[in-house]
Amino acid sequence: MARVSDMVGSVASISVYPVKSLAGRSVPAALVDPAGLRGDRAYAVVDADTGERVTVKTTPELRQVVATGDAEADTITLTEVLGRPVRLDAGGEGPQVDAAAVHLVSRQAIDRAEAGDVPDGCSADDPRANVLLDLPDGDERTWVGRTVRVGDVELYVTRTPKHCLGVYAEVRRPGEITVGDVVRL
């Protein structure tokens, strides 16, 4: 059983998804607010004619587009790729997340998924996590109900995703996460 200060791994990479359902961008560091990584899922794609949200579940082509963070440029690219008019809808106060502020996945979870240990509907190729961890001797699924420190950010792990790898966490103490930061339980 890990003690509060036990180092369990490190941050391998950080991804921000400026537009929900689009491909993410790797960043060397990210500020983490109570609502999640700053700039993450700040916009959603909306059909300009119907006002309905356009998601990767109904429109897989969204995954091909890497958001630049420039709403005007991203709207033009999406309209061209999808062949119909769309707009980006700002999320208001925070990221447009479905389950939790931060999604953590370990390289080891991806390895397990590639070996066949993967939830139905999940992709080991693109787990869409914000923070990829290297946990040499650990399994993040055992962290549910526990507090994790990543850099100077404190996260409370709430649950495992139903159709995805890793764990979801809420932000208890905001701060910055950097690639290479130590992860402590």
Image (spheres, rainbow, N blue to C red):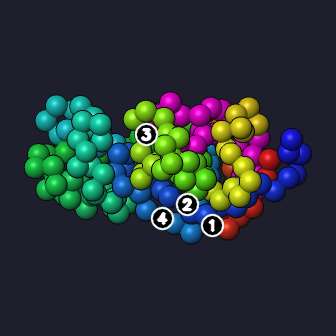
Is residue 153 placed above or below 116 in the rendered structure?
below
Cα separation between marks 1 and 3: 25 Å
Q: Which kind of residue does numbered mark 2 sit on?
A: Ile
Residue drawn at (27%, 49%) of the image: 62
Left or right: 175, with 61 as reference point = right
Image quadrant containing the N terminus: top right
Location of residue 183 (image quadrant) = bottom right
Q: Which kind of residue does numbered mark 1 sit on?
A: Val
Return the mark for residue 122: 3
Whether residue 72 can be seen here: no
Cα separation between marks 2 and 1: 7 Å
Q: Earlier in the sequence, mark 1 or mark 3?
A: 3
Spot occupied by residue 124 in the image (x, y as percentages of width and height): 45, 49
Q: Quick one: label 4, few (<14), some, or many (20+) residues within 10 Å?
A: few
Along the viewing direction, whichever of 151 and 3 lies nearer the viewer: 3
Q: Is residue 151 magenta?
A: yes
Residue numbers of the magenta segment: 147-169
Q: Which residue is mark 4?
A: 26
Spot occupied by residue 67 in the image (x, y as percentages of width and height): 34, 58
Q: Earlier in the sequence, mark 2 or mark 4?
A: 2
Q: Which kind of residue does numbered mark 4 sit on?
A: Ser
Q: Which kind of residue does numbered mark 3 sit on?
A: Cys
Q: Earlier in the sequence, mark 4 or mark 1?
A: 4
Do residues under tags 2 and 4 come within 8 Å of each other at their CB atoms? Answer: yes
Along the viewing direction, whichever of 178 and 182 lies nearer the viewer: 182
Q: Which residue is mark 2?
A: 14
Return the mark for residue 30: none
Whether residue 25 can be seen here: yes
